[in-house]
Image (cartoon, helix red, strand yellow):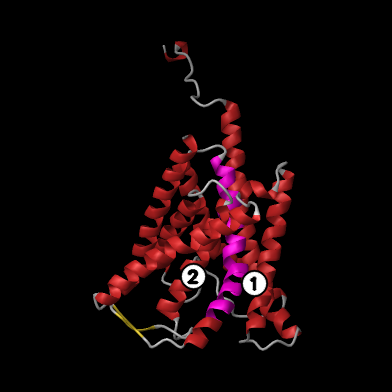
């Protein structure tokens, strides 16, 4: 009797399945681009800086791997976009005025959330701060912004919240695209350490760490925080209609800067840092990221209603 039953029909047309398969492949390619760029930059950058005679701890030496990462990532993403028959602006770039506005919003939203949450944490005694050194703090803000923009914010957002997100969003719903983009984001650190180790070994360096997270990080804590951060960046990427990728870039830069001052300021010579952190203090970071995410969601819904009139 079973032979007489009609075969179960696939609920999804083959064309849709094919489109989704191609979208997922392109999304993974975006992650691979970032892992490759980050691994090559951090693996070859120190050797190139030494060849150029730069002091290992100087700003110029730190900029060398950062520039390499951006050059490799942007070149590969641009080639992929052109191969797909599109222009790079499709990823979320825009004109100068729209880009500046989006960047400033990307700085303001997480910056305000961080001030609110860290301020409340300070008032509650979870944090105590050193006296700021204005000159050292200003220099840190300049150098950290330059290095973080080229090493992380610009290439990561272009490859992930740009290429990966755009690829997924063409075939999947917003929530699925957000989760998919964030999942790819989680794969990048581990993959990049393998590329970094291989690159460094080719150049004669040894002892480069390979793992699912960067050296010195607790795997579970790091991946949980990276998940929250990734969702915040997707929320930033989708909050504005014009040049939205710059909102994610501004958010990425701001979060890195806040965390490095608040949690690592003494080690990074930031000119301002916390001198005491209670055991619960690290939880303030995902908390302020969650506040920023909620703000971006509200901003995005408001912008959508205004567009509909």
Q: Is residue 247 above or below residue 151?
A: above
Q: Is residue 119 above or below residue 20?
A: below
Residue span colored magenta: 140-169
Image quarter (top left, top right, bottom left or bottom right) of the N terminus: top left
Residue 159 visible to the viewer: no
Pick the residue in front: 79 or 306: 306
User: Of marks 1 and 2, which one's residue comes earlier in the chain?
Assistant: 1
Q: Residue at x 57, y 48 (%)?
A: 242
- Which of the 4 quarters of the picture holds residue 126? bottom left
In the visual, does 150 lie left or right of 127?
right
In the visual, does 270 lie left or right of 279?
right
Pick the residue in front: 217 or 248: 248
Q: How many numbered dots are placed on residues in this image?
A: 2
Q: Is residue 135 above or below residue 80?
A: below
From the top left corner, tell me how far across and down residue 82 is, in percent: 73, 46
Element assignment for label 1: helix
- The residue tagged 2 is 256
- Which of the 4 quarters of the picture holds residue 51? bottom right
From the top left corner, tell me how far across and down residue 3 is, in percent: 46, 14
Q: Residue at x 47, y 20 (%)?
A: 8
Spatial CA distance of label 1 from label 2 is: 15 Å
Residue 84 visible to the viewer: yes
Residue 26 falls within the magenta-colored stretch = no
Q: Main secondary structure of the magenta part?
A: helix
Callout in the foreground (1, 2): 2
- The residue tagged 1 is 66
Q: Is residue 253 above or below residue 200?
A: above
Pick the residue in front: 191 or 235: 235
């Amino acid at each position: 009797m079973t032979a007489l039953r009609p075969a179960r029909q696939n609920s999804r047309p083959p064309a849709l399945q094919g489109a989704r398969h191609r979208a997922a492949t392109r999304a993974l390619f975006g992650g691979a681009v970032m892992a490759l760029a980050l691994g090559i930059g951090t693996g070859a950058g120190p050797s190139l800086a030494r060849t150029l005679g730069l002091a290992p701890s100087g700003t110029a030496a730190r900029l060398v791997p950062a520039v390499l990462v951006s050059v490799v990532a942007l070149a590969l993403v641009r080639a992929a976009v052109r191969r797909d028959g599109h222009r790079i602006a499709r990823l979320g770039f825009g004109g100068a005025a729209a880009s500046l506005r989006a960047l400033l919003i990307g700085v303001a939203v997480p910056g305000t959330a961080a001030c609110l949450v860290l301020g409340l944490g300070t008032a509650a005694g979870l944090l105590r701060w050193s006296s700021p050194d204005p000159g050292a703090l200003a220099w840190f803000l300049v150098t950290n912004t330059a290095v973080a923009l080229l090493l992380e914010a610009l290439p990561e957002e272009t490859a992930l919240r740009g290429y990966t997100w755009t690829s997924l969003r063409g075939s999947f719903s917003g929530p699925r695209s957000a989760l998919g983009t964030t999942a790819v984001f989680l794969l990048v650190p581990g993959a990049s350490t393998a590329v970094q180790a291989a690159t460094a070994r080719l150049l004669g360096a040894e002892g480069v760490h390979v793992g699912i997270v960067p050296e010195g990080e607790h795997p579970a804590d790091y991946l949980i925080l990276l998940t929250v951060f990734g969702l915040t960046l997707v929320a930033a990427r989708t909050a504005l209609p014009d040049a939205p990728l710059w909102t994610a870039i501004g958010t990425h830069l701001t979060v890195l800067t806040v965390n490095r001052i608040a949690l690592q300021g003494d080690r990074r010579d930031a000119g301002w840092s916390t001198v005491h952190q209670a055991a619960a203090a690290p939880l303030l970071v995902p908390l302020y990221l969650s506040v920023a995410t909620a703000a971006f969601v509200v901003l995005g819904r408001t912008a959508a209603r205004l567009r509909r009139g």
